Image: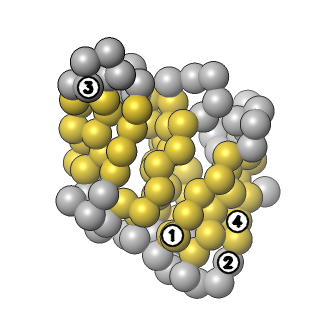
Amino acid sequence: MLVSGGSDKNVRIWGLDFGDCHKSMFLFADKITSVKFIPDTHFFVAASKDKSIKHVDADKFVVISIVGHHYGEIWGLGINSVGDCIISVSSDRSIMVWKKDNEPVLPY
């Protein structure tokens, strides 16, 4: 499975066997700047210039939660090797760490 996002505001989930598009999802109000799979899962996070980060299930094609929100455009995402921390960087000159707990994902 592969995920891509771009200036058309769509996230596309691709199959690697035949290169077919499994699903195209309109998730954001502005360009998508970063998408990352959470290690060893079919979940991914995506960020956009609309200042939001969304957690998505690539098997069910649903948004699980809105992870975070910056005051400026989000330029990039990182995920630790365990998959319980999401790091985001923004044009508002902030770096935020979002820690997953038994509760919804909260800023750390």
Q: Whole-percent x and y of residue 107?
A: 71, 57
Q: Alpha-carbon distance for marks 1 and 2?
A: 9 Å
Tell me the kind of residue under disc 1. Answer: Ile
Q: Decide if residue 8 is in sight here.
A: yes
- Of the residues under marks 2 and 3, which one precedes in the sequence? 3
Report the residue at 47% width, 56% height from top.
Answer: 34
Viewer-proximal residue among 73 and 1: 1
Q: Residue at x 78, y 57 (%)?
A: 108
Does 105 sit left or right of 3 as displayed?
A: right
The mark tally for this picture is 4
Residue kind at label 4, given as amino acid type: Met
Q: Are marks 4 and 3 in contact (CB under 8 Å)?
A: no
At horizontal 44% and vertical 36% (from top left) the residue drawn is 56
Q: Is residue 47 above or below residue 73?
A: above
As drawn, 73 above or below 98? below
Residue topped by disc 4: 96
Residue at the extreme front:
18
Q: Which disc, if any, is residue 19?
A: 3
Q: CA distance from mark 1 to mark 3?
A: 29 Å
Question: In this rendering, which labeled residue sits more in front, label 1 or label 3?
Answer: 3
Q: Position of residue 40 (x, y in %)?
A: 63, 22
Is residue 106 in sight in this rendering? no
The numbered mark, 1 or 3, whose residue comes first in the sequence reads: 3
Q: Which residue position holds label 1?
A: 74
Badge 1 or badge 2: first in the primary sequence:
1
Residue farthest bottom in this picture = 92
Pointer 2 with pointer 4, Cβ within 8 A? yes
How crowded pointer 4 is (Cα within 10 Å; few <14, some 14-19, many 20+) is rated as: some
Q: CA distance from mark 2 to mark 4?
A: 6 Å
Sequence-first tag of 1 and 4: 1
